[in-house]
Structure formats: structure tokens, C-alpha cells
Amino acid sequence: MGGKYHRSSHGGDACCCCNIFSCFLDCLCTCICQIICTILIIAAIVIFILWLIFRPKNIDFYATNASLTEFNLEGNTLHYNLDLNFTIRNPNERIGVQYDRIEAITFYQGQRFAAQQLAPFYQEQNSTDTVSAEFKGQNIITLGGDQLSNYNDEKGSGKFGIDVKLYLRIKLKFGLLESSTTVNPTIDCDIKIPLTTNGIARVKYEEQKCHYGWR
Ligand SMILES: *[C@@H]1O[C@H](CO)[C@@H](O)[C@H](O)[C@H]1NC(C)=O
Ligand SMILES: *[C@@H]1O[C@H](CO)[C@@H](O)[C@H](O)[C@H]1NC(C)=O
Ligand SMILES: *[C@@H]1O[C@H](CO)[C@@H](O)[C@H](O)[C@H]1NC(C)=O
């Protein structure tokens, strides 16, 4: 009894009566460890090779041109007429993009005022596409005192800061394979748009780059 206790305390082994069994367990553990390690290394090599082949790059979004012919607040009602063009650049040479859903939503000082669903399309590798959205109508927005004075300042400057978010659902096509997973990125275009009155805008619209954002 004492001998066994002595031995196990030195070996650091809690099980004092089944050394053959614990040796077998150790062996099994090592074996499973080796298999897992091998699988991880192979997976890492495969991912690295796929990365070398496809070299994924970010798809870039630009708010290329915009025309704002009406942006009038009467009480709580905003009357708007906004025409937007986006350029989408896919710089990947081996990845095509299927845009299954493109929802464009416009916000003014955090208040959502218009939304539109754009037509789905497929974007080839290494290509640039243009999509347009038109927003025309009226909606109720509630602006606080500070926001109201911002609106009046912007009206005076002839330029409104409008936030356009694109909610996307996309599928990637690697070579001949279409990935089975869809991704839902949000694109944030925080843009300044000059107001055009009687066909004349006091300032010229300048192309602005959009960035990846959060919902
Ligand atoms: C931008 O849109 C305005 C209004 O539609 C147009 O007059 C102007 O030529 C456009 N600019 C470019 C660079 O397409
Ligand atoms: C957006 O593009 C369409 C088609 O290319 C064009 O007819 C329209 O004038 C453009 N709008 C703006 C604001 O540039
Ligand atoms: C990608 O497109 C650009 C411009 O359209 C072209 O100059 C370039 O050669 C293309 N690259 C490949 C690898 O096809």
C-alpha cells in the first residue's frame, strides 16, 4: 500500500491501481493529439494555398455622383428628392460577387427617411459596376433643437450631410464554385450633397468613398 502511494505521488499520477490502463490512456491521448495536430497543419496549408490562389481584396464602394433637388423641412415633414450613383469596384481577379440583395437606406442626422431595394446583379472578377438609387417623397422626422439648428446651418451652406447605408447580402464565387455561405456586410456612405435649386448647385458634388460599417 505504502509503496504504491509512494510511487504514484512521485509519478504525479492520481490513479494508483491501474498503471497499465493509464498508460493506455496516455498513449491514446498522444495519438489523438497527433491526429488533431496533423489535421490543423493540413487545414492551415490548404487555407494558405487557397489564399495564395485567390488573394482576396476588399470590394470598394464609392458614392460617385449625387443630385439633391429638394430637401425641405416643413414642420416635421421632410420633402426630399435625391438621386444617387454608386460605383462598386471588385479588384479580385479570381472572385466574382453575386449581390442577392441591396437595400439602400437614407438617414438625416440619425433619422431614417427613405429606403429602396436595388436590383440584384452579378459582378465579374476585376470589374466596376454602377448602381443608381432614386429617393423621392416625404416622411416624418423628428429633430431636436440642436438638430434643427444644424439643418438651418446646412441649408444656409447649401450642402446637406446625408448618411446612406447599403445593406447587402452577397455570395462569393471562387472560380467555378459559388460559396454556399452568404455574407451580409453594411456599407456606410456618409456624404455631403449640395442642394440644387432651379437647376443650379452652389457647390459641386465630389466623389466620396464609402466604408464598411455596422448595422
Ligand atoms: C453628376 O450629376 C449631375 C446632376 O445629375 C450632373 O449634372 C453631372 O454632370 C454629374 N457629374 C458627373 C461627373 O457625372
Ligand atoms: C446616375 O446614373 C444614371 C445612369 O448612368 C444617370 O442617368 C443619372 O443621371 C446619374 N445620376 C447622377 C446623380 O449622376
Ligand atoms: C483588370 O482590369 C484593368 C482595367 O479594366 C485592366 O487594366 C487589367 O489588365 C485587368 N487585370 C487582369 C488581370 O485582367
Image (cartoon, helix red, strand yellow):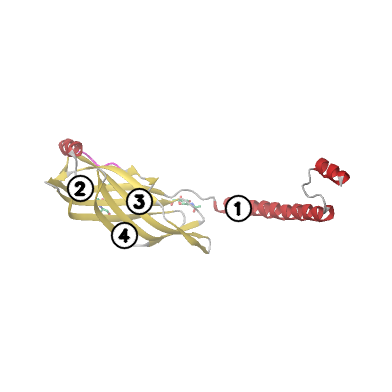
Residue at label 2?
Answer: 68
Numbered mark located on residue 106 in the image: none
Q: Amino acid at mark 1?
A: Ile
Q: Amino acid at mark 4?
A: Leu
Q: Secondary structure at mark 2?
A: strand
Compared across the picture, whether 65 is left or right of 129 comes to left
Residue at label 3?
Answer: 87
Residue at (48% x, 52% y) in the render = 92
Disc 1 versus disc 3: nearer the observer: 1
Q: Amino acid at mark 2?
A: Leu
Q: Earlier in the sequence, mark 2 or mark 1?
A: 1
Which region of the structure is painted magenta?
A: 202-206
Residue at (23% x, 40% y) in the render = 204
Q: Earlier in the sequence, mark 3 or mark 2?
A: 2
Residue at label 1?
Answer: 47
Residue at label 4?
Answer: 118
